[in-house]
Amino acid sequence: MTIKNLLLHTTFLLVILSIIFVFKSATEKKELHGDNNGNNYRNYAQSQWRTNATMTTTDKNETVVDDGNFTKTLQGTIQDIAIKKSKNELNGDDTNDTTLPLQVNVTTTTTRKHEIDGDENYTLPLQFSEMIGKDEKVYTNYTLPLQANAKIDNGSDDKWKKVLMTDAAYKNGAVCLDGSPGGYYIRKHNNYTNNYDNNFFENNWIIFHQGGGWCGNDRNCLKRSKERLGSSNFWAPTYDEHNAGSELFSTPYFENYTIVYAMYCDGSSWTSNVDHPVTVSNNEVIYYRGRRLLDALIDNLVLVEGLKNASKVLYSGCSAGALTTFLHIDYVASRLLSFSPSVKVLGLADAMFSLDQNQFDGTPGLFQRIAEWGYQAWNSSYSINSGCKNSRSEEEDEWKCMFGEHVSMFVKTPVFIINSKFDTWQRKTILGTDCDIGVNCPKSKETFDVEYGRSMLRALERIPKDHGYFVSNCPGHCQTIARWNWNHIAIDNVKMKDAFLMWYDQQNNLGKSDNPSIQYADTGDLEPSVTSMCRRR
């Protein structure tokens, strides 16, 4: 073969090899970057990838960092990752969104103010590595910036957010009667900030306990566990503006307060403390864990929501929530003072200045029977006011501290009491009189009710002088929800709302007054059922 022919053959061979190389390279590019079905992808440094997925968390650990924020470690699983490639710089083509049918285990941390649990999606920047593809040529590791949607339940209202204390339920057994997690609704005030170095900024709070009575035996508690007062499974996605406390919350004085509406689901005014589930019937169980729920509530508010930096806290509630206030305010105040020695804690108890008296026929009333049974069944001795408990000469009488008249005498934290001398709930459940005074009550029952009102005034004389009160003749119960009562019922021309605000302001500024006690009571035996009279006063 001549040199010329050799050169021709060599050139031809090089051309053939070049064509094969180019074809092979093109094939590999297509294989590495995926076919039209998006089956195989590989991340090149020259390419820009974005991914989105929904992560279902399987475990959550939490810590609190120095700035008061809540750092949560999420461990979860992501499936069917949607990948968008903004520009394939190797071939110059845009790539459509595709989905990889694979599973990725993820661990990440995020810092925010609420538990991750519920319905609202937000974005977390994640990094993960995973093997993809089945062909050995493209079976490779890759690392992509992933935007994953974890969840937090904040309902549909922009102001109120629902928080379920799932971690406390899992770790500490802090659960409702049915075993579901406890929780609360929270409305952060407009000027909320983490800049606590600003001396002009006050981080003020209202914690308000929902009412709802008590369950008086295991079967009744089991029934309750299947309703909203015993299970968080029945709670609405956001706070109902018609709930107790709504008039208090809407008072302009508190417009910049962070407000917590603590949901009630233990049936014991947050006092029950039984370690083991209680079997009732048909192997159905309930949980008496009110005290654990209270501790979980305070823990979550302090460590997650920012309560540990509070300036002022109004600890309050209505009905069963008012008894909760009497029973626990000193304990709550001591816990908050350990975090913030300068915090000012005050109380508002709406409608449970109840008297320990037998009913009209001389027998113990319904609430007496509930309190005596529940104190033992719930193992409540650890949870009630210690001063009141220690004052009882007989251990079997400690349950009487579930009555407002007894426990209020030993509450050291100043509390403002709102009550009616003819409280509609107390008349039925304590006195056993369900008639309307001045309308269809026999004279004997009417006299009995009037005497109960007089006894209430005598009991008020025994409470600490720093406690304030507004006790009228107008029938009512949970008056922080009743617009007319809160804004218009008056004693000595002072309205209920104004009496409370005067007391609250003076307690927060004791240097401005030598007499911080604001105490208003109807002293006459006026016919309380005449609504027009109450409206005019």
Image (cartoon, helix red, strand yellow):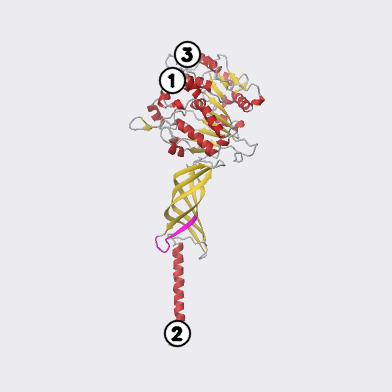
Q: Secondary structure at mark 1?
A: helix
Residue on which the image places disc 3: 445
Q: Is residue 103 rendered to the left or right of residue 332?
A: left
How dense is the environment of label 2, judged by Cα within 10 Å: few (below 14), some, or many (20 and up)? few
* Rendering coords of residue 400 (x, y %): 46, 20
* Rendering coords of residue 3 (x, y %): 46, 87
Residue type beneath disc 3: Lys
* Rendering coords of residue 35 (x, y %): 44, 62
Residues under numbered marks 2 and 1 in contact, where contact means CB atoms less than 8 Å apart: no
What quarter of the picture does the C terminus occupy? top right
N-term mark: 2 or 1:
2
Q: Which segment did they paint magenta? A: 134-144
Whether residue 136 appears in magenta in the rendering, the answer is yes
N-term mark: 3 or 2:
2
Q: Secondary structure at mark 2?
A: helix
Image disc number at residue 6: 2
Q: For the residues marked 3 and 1, what is the alpha-carbon distance in whole angstroms?
A: 33 Å
N-term mark: 3 or 1:
1
Tell me which residue sits at (45%, 65%) in the image: 30
Res 498 → quadrant: top right
* Residue 288 visible in the snapshot: yes
Image disc number at residue 395: 1
Residue type beneath disc 2: Leu
How dense is the environment of label 3, judged by Cα within 10 Å: few (below 14), some, or many (20 and up)? some
Whether residue 271 appears in magenta in the rendering, the answer is no
